[in-house]
Amino acid sequence: MASSIHVRNQYTKEHTIYNPLRANRPMQPQNKDPKVYVDELSSATKKMCDFCNYEKLTAKDIFGRIEGKHSVTAANAFKLDKWHGLMLSKRHNPSEITEEEFVDLFNTTLKWFKKVNSIDKSSRFSNVLWDSLPHAGASQLHPHIHGLMDSEHYYGILEEQNAASLEYYEATGNNYWEDIIEIHHALGLTKRFGGAIAITSLTSRKDNEVILLSDEPSLDLFRLLYYVVQTYYQKFKLYCHSSGMAFPVLGERRDRSLPALIRIATRGDCGSVRSDISSLELYTAYNVNVDVYKVISNISDTVTNLTARSSIDWNPMMPWL
């Protein structure tokens, strides 16, 4: 019997190799509990944090700041595009963000996109980048989200996902995302929460990757994302993660639009000197060393446990269109 399982998506060209045995390769042992590491790093960086002192140490966009109860926007000093903003949590330690604070952060993100579009109607394609903690590529420990808007395309891999869905429709007449959901549901790899659904993808790019989908960015979607992140923290003790997101095109033309799409995955032990990515992932195929069924099972448990204790009983999200 082969020790690895290869899964290929003929439309996105994604190729993932599953081999949980590779997780048992010799590695540097953890020196301390990951939560202790994050808390200590948070304490060490809080006093000199630019984002904690955002009013004095960050710039405003040309339209000023958008401020929520627990979050605020800032202009990005190192822009990747014409419209590139930062959305900041008002809490410094990423492991301590509450569900309400998390939802507020993403609501502020949506407001930033809609504000940009109201000023510049040509900017309609919304992209989100989010890395948590330095090991995952974050420049600062303080929780912050990058929002970018483009007039013609989604960015990079997000545009590849969109192109694949359009090619699939032309070839089959079916909705790509509906069929992806159906396939994964038949295999027991989905968890639905209201109008949103989480999938542990057969073509994951990294360990513990989850794809979240809904017709529009919504309260259900971001609550489910919060539960996925809490699963990483509580079940897997993994605090470093990276995510890419895209939302439906703003404006009348929707023929090239993705649904609300989030891809998020863990990035390994935050305190490790060992990289979680190699030439294998960069130049050939994605390598995943976890059991996708354990991932979705733990997400399901987290959703059950946290919704029972959730204090959110309102919907702060404005309609996307």
Image (cartoon, helix red, strand yellow):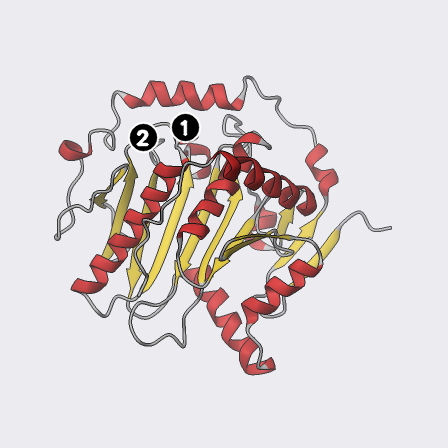
Which residue is drawn at the image coordinates 70% and 33% (left, top)? 25
Kind of residue sitting beneath label 2? Arg
* Residue 173 x/y as whole percent: 57, 82
> Residue 53 at what x, y percent from top left?
20, 29
Residue 82 visible in the displayed image: no
Front residue of this view, candidates 184 and 168: 184
Find residue 81 and report its horizontal and vertical position in percent: 26, 57
Of the residues under marks 2 and 1, which one precedes in the sequence? Answer: 2
Q: Relative to residue 188, is residue 236 depicted above or below?
A: above
Report the side of 9 relative to 44 (left or right): right
The numbered dot on residue 273 is none
Relative horizontal placement of residue 221, taking residue 65 as reference (left or right): right
Assign a secondary structure to mark 2: loop
Between marks 2 and 1, how big is the CA–CA gap? 8 Å
In the rendered image, which residue does mark 1 sit on?
Answer: 96
Pick whichever, 149 or 108, lies toward us: 108
Neighbours of disc 2 within 10 Å: few (<14), some (14-19), many (20+): some
Farthest residue in the right direction? 1
Residue extending furthest toward the front: 313
Mark number displayed over residue 91: 2
Locate residue 154 relative to residue 123 in the image: left or right: right
Under circle 1, the secondary element is helix
- Residue at 40% from the left image edge and 55% from the top image edge: 218
Q: Residue at x 58, y 77 (%)?
A: 174
Task: Kindly identify the amino acid type of the residue bearing the numbered disc 1.
Answer: Glu
Question: CB atoms at circles 2 and 1 under 8 Å apart?
Answer: yes
